[in-house]
Amino acid sequence: MVFEFLQSFDAIEITGGLTLLNLLMGGIIMAVGLIIARTIKLLFTKYYAPKLPQDSAKNLGKLIYFGIIILSFLVFTSSTGVDLSGLLVAGGIFGIVIGFATQSVVANLISGIFLMIEKPVKQGDKIEIPGTDVNGTLLDISTFSVRVKRFDGTIIRVPNESFFTSNIRSLSSTPVRRSEAIVGIAYKEDIDGAISVLQKHIRKALPYVLTFPEPEFRIKELADSSVNIEILVWHPRDDWDQVGPKLLKAAKNALDTAGIEIPFPQRVVWQGKE
């Protein structure tokens, strides 16, 4: 009875050798493929995704889901006996046209895959791309773009290709960081005495500064109006906001307290007479 019923379905031809039975079997294959794709995606999200970075887990879940659906579609076409040669030829020509129009989209997609594989930075890292206004906290790496929350609170979207090919400076990958500042003293002042004053006051005013590596003080430049001293201090990464913005203030207070002059720009004019 069932066999005769299926034979009757097989006898009904829709188009191009495609029978109603083939179409029914193909629909079952696609439905099973969809169920399998959703099940595997749920299992992946529950058991494996928590072990991966959030953005990588999200994109990998999409890749698994749509990969199974595409595989099911290929099984569907092969089981129904549909001839896709004409469609492939037309699709190839159409694909060339679309390819030229979507080069940036494909480049962003491929760059996103490489970013997820290489993982130069991860979600939550503070980053900076030198020479641009891209600086802040990395929110996520999606299929085509990267989102960064800037230090001023705004969010900027960067295409994956631009992000991948740029020099990315990570501000969170190491446990300690170095802050720099330059302060100038008058030529009449004692350099060693000024450095000693700076060293003592900075240690007292900024307890976050590490004793090892110890702070460094270098003569940066003999400028027109001052001797410029470069101050280099190391501190824990998370204490940057307690050291970086306050280093110059601590240096000026130290020199003011010791009565060491910080000169303003000035010129000595010689008229050619003794």
Image: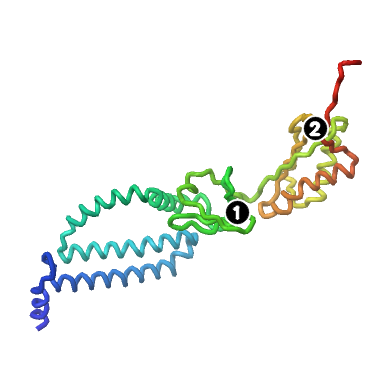
2 horizontally vs 162: left or right: left
Q: Position of residue 150 (x, y in %)?
A: 60, 55
- Binning the other alpha carbons within 10 Å of mark 1 as few (below 14), some (14 to 19) or many (20 upward) gives many
Q: Residue at x 24, y 50 (%)?
A: 93
Q: Residue at x 67, y 55 (%)?
A: 238
155 horizontally vs 27: left or right: right
Q: Position of residue 100 (x, y in %)?
A: 34, 47
What numbered label is drawn on residue 227? 2
Answer above or below: position of 35 versus 145: below
Q: Residue at x 61, y 50 (%)?
A: 171
Answer above or below: position of 206 versus 59: above
86 horizontally vs 155: left or right: left
39 horizontally vs 210: left or right: left
Q: CA distance from mark 1 to mark 2?
A: 34 Å
Q: Position of residue 75 (x, y in %)?
A: 22, 64
Q: Extreme bottom residue here?
A: 1
Are discs 1 and 2 less than 8 Å apart at CB?
no
Q: Nearer the viewer, residue 111 or 12?
A: 12
> Tag 1's secondary structure?
strand
**Amino acid on which disc 2 is placed:** Val
What numbered label is drawn on residue 136? 1
Quadrant of the image containing the C terminus: top right
Q: Position of residue 37 (x, y in %)?
A: 33, 68
What numbered label is drawn on residue 102? none
Q: Nearer the viewer, residue 106 or 214?
A: 106
